[in-house]
Image (cartoon, helix red, strand yellow):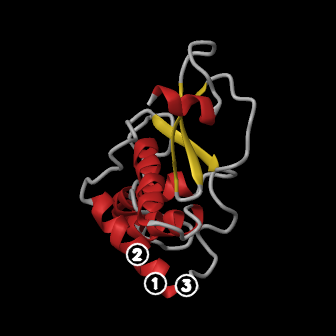
């Protein structure tokens, strides 16, 4: 009987923790997950690149097709750099910049060029035969894209620059 009462009182607490938006398998906060994504994905090259990566993360969080937390989005399999949530951030200056930009993003700042539809990016210089991705920006060593209806635009980043 005493064990049943403990379970009865513990259940609401356990259920409330299960829905915690900052849950991460590594015990990281939203700020940590966001900073790590920007640090590893922007090649630690620029504030602009970090801001663009962070904007994509937040665009995904706001889209019901993706996990509804920063750590959930960053931790999605095959979406971000391998080890993004576990590898050490060795470059102290770049890590500090990533945390600074993460703070700004979590306060609502977004990259000026990226609309809420921009949810995809890959390393600049690579070309993929996308038929449904519209090139928007190159920043921090990445090309950023938004999904659009196939055949209504060019998917070549170099040609797309003429439209901007």
- The residue positioned farthest toward the top in the image shown: 151
Instruction: Give residue 58's position: percent from left, percent from top.
Output: 40, 49
The secondary element bearing badge 2 is classed as: helix
Please give the name of the residue rendered at 37% of the width and 42% of the height, measured from the top-left corner: 113
- Where disc 1 sits, the SS reads helix
Q: Is residue 136 above or below residue 108?
A: above
Q: Is residue 36 visible?
A: yes
Q: Who's the residue at 69% across and 28% down the image?
A: 130
How far across and how far down the image is residue 78, in percent? 69, 51
**Mark 2–mark 1 distance (CA, rounded to whole Å):** 6 Å
Residue tagged 1: 93
Q: Position of residue 101 (x, y in %)?
A: 36, 66
Picture coordinates of residue 134 (x, y %)? 56, 28
Name the residue tied to disc 3.
91
**Dots 2 and 3: beta carbons under 8 Å?**
no
Q: Residues within 10 Å of mark 2 (few under 14, many from 20)?
A: some
Real-space Cα separation, disc 1 to disc 3, in angstroms: 6 Å
Image quarter (top left, top right, bottom left or bottom right) of the C terminus: top left
Callouts 1 and 3 close, C-beta under 8 Å: yes
Q: Which mark is residue 50?
A: none
* Residue of label 2: 97
Looking at the image, do the residues carrying marks 2 and 1 touch, with CB atoms under 8 Å apart?
A: yes
């Amino acid at each position: 009987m005493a064990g049943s009462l403990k379970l009865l009182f513990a259940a609401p607490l356990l259920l409330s923790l299960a829905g915690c938006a900052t849950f991460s398998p590594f015990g990281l906060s939203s700020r940590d997950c966001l900073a790590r994504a920007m640090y590893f994905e922007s090649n630690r090259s620029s504030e602009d690149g970090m801001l663009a990566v962070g904007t994509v993360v937040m665009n995904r969080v706001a889209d019901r097709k993706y996990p509804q937390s920063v750590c959930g989005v960053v931790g999605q399999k095959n979406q971000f750099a391998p080890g993004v949530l576990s590898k050490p951030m060795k470059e102290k200056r770049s890590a500090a910049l990533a945390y600074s930009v993460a703070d700004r993003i979590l306060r609502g700042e977004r990259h000026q060029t990226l609309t809420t539809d921009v949810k995809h990016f890959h390393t600049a210089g690579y070309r993929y035969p996308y038929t449904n991705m519209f090139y928007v920006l190159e920043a921090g060593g990445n090309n950023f894209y938004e999904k659009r209806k196939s055949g209504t635009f060019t998917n070549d980043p170099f040609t797309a620059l003429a439209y901007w």
